Image (cartoon, helix red, strand yellow):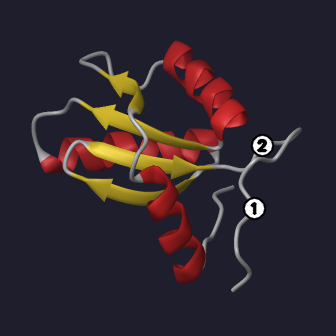
Amino acid sequence: MSIVLTSAQNRFLRGIAHDLKALLQIGGKGVTPAFLAELDEVLERHELVKVKVAAEDREARDTLIGELIQASGAALVQRIGHVAVLYRPAKEKRQIVLPRG
């Protein structure tokens, strides 16, 4: 189940994500179970993550990003070129408090 963000929450998260570096990168193997396990762990630890998607064309990138969102239950905050920003609140210790609205 993906998270639905309001436009205010989306803006807030984009502001935080601006200074982040991409922590994960999808290569030629695509979305593997090992990559999903790593993504799950990173989302639990950081909540907001930049993922670099190394696919040739836009459709392939869209497909890979869609698979990531579906498998991780995260929300797509932003996508610029090869980089997608994903957000999922931590189950244990939440670090990011979203604005209401």
29 left or right of 43 in image:
left
Residue at image point 10% right, 35% down:
56
* Residue placed most toward the observer, 61 or 48: 48
Which residue sits at x=28%, y=19%? 27
Crowd tier of the residue under label 1, counting other residues whose Cα lies within 10 Å: few below 14, some 14–19, many 20 or above: few
Residue sitting at 76 percent across and 47 percent down? Answer: 95
Q: Which mark is residue 97?
A: 1
52 shown above or below 36:
below
Q: Residue furthest left?
A: 56
Q: Amino acid at mark 2?
A: Ala
Rendered image quadrant of residue 12: bottom right
| Nearer to the camera, 65 or 79 | 79
Task: Report the residue that reaches farthest toward the front.
Answer: 19
In the image, taking residue 14 as reference, residue 38 lies left or right, namely: right
**SS class of the residue under badge 1?**
loop
Instruction: Check the image and name the residue furthest to the right.
Output: 92
**Which residue is label 2 attached to?**
90
Marks 1 and 2 close (CB-CB < 8 Å):
no
Tell which of 44 and 67 is nearer to you.
44
Tell me the residue at 31%/16% (across/down): 29
Residue 15 percent location from the top left of the image: 46, 63
